[in-house]
Image (cartoon, grey):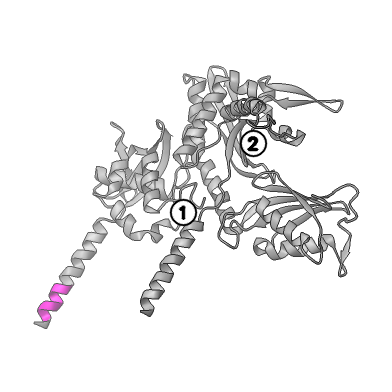
Amino acid sequence: MKKIIFLMMTLIATAVCAMSKGDKIPQYDITGAGSGTEGTILVKVYVYAKKVSDEDLKRCAVHGVVFHGCSGNNSGARQPAMAAPTAESDNAAFCERFFASDGQCQNFASIVAGSYDRVKTAKGYKTGAILQIDKSSLRKELEKAGVVRSLSSGF
Amino acid sequence: MKAKTFLIILFVAMCSVEAMAQAKKPTLMVVPSDAWCKEHGYEQKFDNQGFTELLPDYKAAVATDKQLNAVISKINLLMADRGFPLKDLQQSIKSISNLAAEDRLITSKNTGAEIVESPLDRLRRTAKADIILEIDWTVNTVGPKSSVTYNLRALDAYSGKQVAGAEGTGKGSFSAELPLLLEEAVQDHMDAFSERLQAHFEDLLTNGREVVLDMRVFDGSPIDMESEYDGYELSEVIDNWLSENCVNHRFSKSDATESMILYEQVRIPLYKANGMAQDTYGFARDLARYLAAAPYSIPVKTVNRGLGRCLLIIGAK
């Protein structure tokens, strides 16, 4: 009986680990790709993984805009990260749900048609695309969740 | 029972913290820089006691320059999206002249008396804000290629410090029109600008509002800054009071004579002891009450100069 319980526990633990690993944001690079229309930003994202889906590209792009920022748009202006450096760890539960493969982050990014790119690297391939991020709506959503501070907070 | 009482007290405390968590919000307004006004010919001559001075003519600028209005409108819009709507320069100028005309026509129904207006009131009737967003841009042309050099600065109207800024030159284009390049510049620089402005607001919320206190003495007053009370000069009495009442005892005495003191970088708490939001005038009134009480018994006139500056005149009301 003890052996069965031990086996079941091991199986559950393995499944949970596999699930969490599968939903982890893959390694990525982000750079600015020009000025978007009002309230949006264009970014170029490269994801380092064997298999890269559109969902991965989208969540990496949104994650990058929120927590890393990017540089190099037409006006030479740096796009700073939306959230504070500690915001991701402070709101870990929300971020895990929000940046999941089927999470809400998917609603704020769209891939620019014909912008897919695949480059061979020393360790394999990196897959990229240009994405348009709806910055205004994303900011409002994250302000509501408390991940990003509003300019008027405290007043 | 005890747990219930504790929970009620906790709830009331949380409510009161929530109620007082609203500091006085600074007002922001976008204005063209002096250099931009000069370059575009929006200047007016002003006779300052025999000396001719050139001042920027904002009224003419906003009334005629469509590009300026488009840039101001874009910045206003982007800041409103961030939950921080700005005062509009054109609207402020219009409402000042409209209200001045209205005030001149208002009379009492019973006595026919007009509204009292001192020369100081008239002088103060200008478009003003606590933080000025000064905008400037230059169009660079190299052959058929055009680019825009853009500069946006946030200046604290009281301390004169630049609290945020964003500047840069765009990559340029052979085909894009100037309004498009300008729009792009405003939009692209706004995030970096807002980030710095937010850092300033966070500093203000953590370390208190940075304000300026001017102290003067009325002509003919028997008291000046060197008058002694229990072996301490009046200026030292004021220093001690400020040290006790400023956040982390932070203030600097920039200049002082027997007839004036200038206190800069005075960090005042955002809230009074009762939880009410506090501005510089409220802080200065506390100092005036302290000096009016025994053993000093000094009458002090307090003149409000905005959210971040106040004038205290010793010796009379």
| Residue under disc 2 on the same chain as residue under disc 1 | no
B60 vs A15, nearest the viewer: B60
Residue found at x 44% / y 46%: A69
**Which quadrant would the N terminus of chain A be assigned to in this image?**
bottom left
Q: Is residue B49 visible?
A: yes
* Mark 1: secondary structure: loop
Q: Main secondary structure of the magenta part?
A: helix
| Image location of residue B106, percent across then percent down | 64, 28
A51 vs B86, nearest the viewer: B86
- Mark 1 = which residue? A84
Residue found at x 23% / y 64%: A17
Q: Is residue B200 above or below residue B269?
A: above
Q: Is residue A128 visible?
A: no
Query: Looking at numbered disc 2 in the image, what kind of residue is underneath it?
Result: Lys
Query: Looking at numbered disc 1 in the image, what kind of residue is underneath it?
Result: Ala
For the record, the magenta segment spans: A3-9
Q: Are marks 2 and 1 in contact (CB under 8 Å)?
A: no
- Mark 2 = which residue? B128
With B81 as the anchor, is B199 left or right in this view?
right
Disc 2 from disc 1: Cα separation: 32 Å
